Amino acid sequence: MIPGTSDGGGRGIVKPLPPEWFVPHDGNAEMRWDAPTGPGPHTPNERFFVRNHTRTPRIDPDTWRLRVHGSGLRGPDAVFSLADLHALPATTLDAVLECAGNGRRFWAEQQGTPAPGTAWGLGGVGMAAWHGVPLGVLLERAGLGPAAVDVLAVGLDPEYRVGGRNLGRVRRPLPLAKALEDVLVAYGMNGEPLPPDHGAPARLVVPGWVGVASVKWLGSLEVSDRPLESPWSTEFYRLFGPGQPADGGPALTRQSVKSAFELAPGAVLAAGRTHRLRGRSWSGAAAVRAVEVSTDGGRVWRTAELLDPPSRYGWRRWALDWRPAAPGRYGLRARATDLLGRTQGAEAPFNREGYLFDAVVVHPVEVV
């Protein structure tokens, strides 16, 4: 059993989940790509997907405290209130957050290799303008020592129980190099205080990495002078299966390349008219360089118009005009390539848990 299939009860999300905006998944909520999200590139807070291991806690921001401790500090524990975080140097970062299992349903639908867990389409993803304190600044203020190697972030959501075991609170280590590079302790989202479902009062944002690294409802940070582990880095969020070591691959880090149409699956379009196909593409490793679209089963690919400048951790919106000549059923395809040359292929290499699906997704439409 993997995260997302807990046998515990009491799961819940705070914000409303209207069906025209979300597809529910057993305590999680997937964004619908056909729901308009406004003129800008950011996903509005009320429409941002929700991935919980248990349920959203309600935490009083006035009494909340963040404890920083461990053998990697020069001195005693440090404790920060939300007001303390607000007093530190802050920055705003445009970044996509994406569940590692986003696209899991397509292992079965496109490749005939079903994988267990939440059957996300492509809506387990969103992009926001995250505001907060660089984790490196916070660690230096806490007394980061020269021997530190790992930082373990621990959330304040209820303890996670699965298969009759209590695995404790969600927690996952980061290597110090990543923690100091670009990670944010965020308390703002799209110009507003962080909402409860998205980690209030404060959360990590680990840009480019799988979503589980961006621990929500941050309660403590253990700074260690030796490597740290948790079930979310040893048992879950690793690759098992063909091409992997017998005991599994390393803990997942960077996200893969994906593309999605801003169009309902099975949408009905008129023949003989020009339709503006729109979508978004993203990569965890580098900015998206190009997006190509095929409307004829992948035989011919046309370059889409990119509507946003390159963004290291954000997605790029794109558009392409299509005038279908004849009625029928079509499978639209989009593939992105990032600045490192990573692109989307016709198939994704299978792994047992269905993580990191990065193949081109066939988007069905009907022309009448």
Image (cartoon, grey):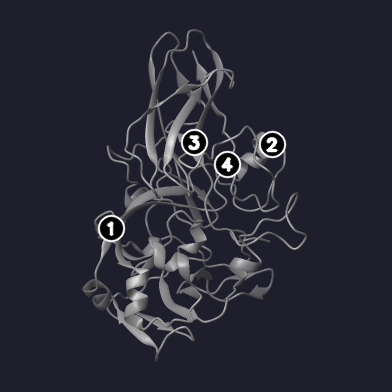
Tell me the amino acid under the disc marked 4.
Asp
Tell me the amino acid under the disc marked 2.
Gln
C-alpha separation, residue under disc 2 versus residue under disc 4:
12 Å
**In the rendered image, is residue 55 in sight?**
yes
Furthest residue toward left: 87
Drawn side of residue 254 relative to residue 88, left or right:
right
Q: Please name which of the two marks, 3 or 1, marks the residue nearer to the observer.
A: 3
Please name the residue that numbered disc 4 is placed on. 358
Question: In the rendering, at what x and y percent does residue 271 appear?
Answer: 45, 10
Please name the residue that numbered disc 3 is placed on. 337
Q: Please name which of the two marks, 2 or 4, marks the residue nearer to the observer.
A: 4
Quadrant of the image for the N terminus?
bottom right
Q: Are marks 1 and 4 in contact (CB under 8 Å)?
A: no
Q: Earlier in the sequence, mark 4 or mark 3?
A: 3
Please name the residue that numbered disc 2 is placed on. 111
Q: Which one is nearer the viewer's eye here, 259 or 324?
A: 259
